[in-house]
Each structure stands twice: as structure tokens, then as C-alpha cells.
Image: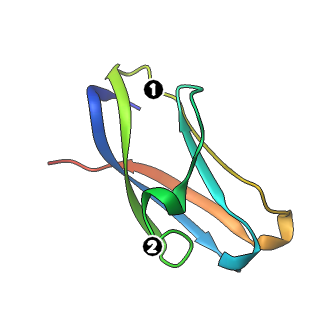
Amino acid sequence: MTGLGGPQWVQLHYRVANPAAGEAYVSVNDEVAYNISSLNDRAGYHDIVPVELNLREGAVNKIMFGTNAGEDTGIVLDGIEMVED
């Protein structure tokens, strides 16, 4: 993902069948993974969740999405979208 060098808003498009069954996490450029619900309390209850992430300048950013839940939780990532000003 192309960044401007600093905090930027992105939208995580994902669905959760059972929000109470586990947590979703996001990390940028192999740094510490953040619990998405700590970045936005809408996480798990809405299909689009905006979060602010610190991105490096240029097309060098790697965003990882993961969960601590089993496959039966029904978490599906549909995409990650940059929020344009």
C-alpha cells in the first residue's frame, strides 16, 4: 500500500459471523500487531472499519490482517482500502 509517510486512515472491509468468538489484528510493516477493536470500537460489528495506521512514504507498506480465532468464527477479509482526503 502506498503511504505518504505518517498516520493515514484506511478502511478494513471484513465480516465476522460471531464477534464474541475471537479478535482480529492488523500490523504494518512487520511491527507490533494491534487489536482492531482497540483502534475502533466498531470492529466486528460493522463490515467497514476505519482505522488510523502509520505508513511509510511510498509503495513499501505491508499490511497484515489476522485473527486469534478458529476457522468456525467466520471472519472474512474482503479488502483494505486507503481513505482519500
Camera-nearest label, 1 or 2: 2
Q: Are marks 1 and 2 in contact (CB under 8 Å)?
A: no
Please give the residue where the numbered disc 2 appears in the rendered image: 42
35 with respect to 21 (left or right) = left
Horizontal side of 40 relative to 72 (left or right) equals: left
Whole-percent x and y of residue 37? 52, 63
Q: How many marks?
A: 2
Identity of the amino acid at label 2? Arg
- Answer with left or right where residue 14 lies relative to residue 76: left
Identify the residue shown where x is 56% and y is 38%: 27
The residue positioned 53% from the left and 57% from the top of the image is 36
Q: Residues within 10 Å of mark 1 (few under 14, many from 20)?
A: some
- Give the mark, 1 or 2, whose residue is nearer the N terminus: 2
Q: Is residue 84 above or below residue 54?
A: below
| Left or right, residue 74 beside residue 12 | right
Mark 1: secondary structure: loop
Q: Looking at the rendering, in which quadrant would you find the N terminus?
A: top left
| Element class at badge 2 | loop
Q: Is residue 18 above or below residue 57?
A: below
> In the image, what residue occupies the spot 28% across and 29% down?
6
x, y percentage for residue 33?
Answer: 60, 40
The one of 5 and 48 positioned closer to us in this rendering: 5
From this view, report whether residue 36 is shown above or below residue 75: above
User: Dot 1 corresponds to which residue?
Assistant: 61
Q: Residue at x 70, y 78 (%)?
A: 20
Identity, as a three-letter code, of the amino acid under mark 1: Asn
Residue 34 percent location from the top left of the image:
56, 46
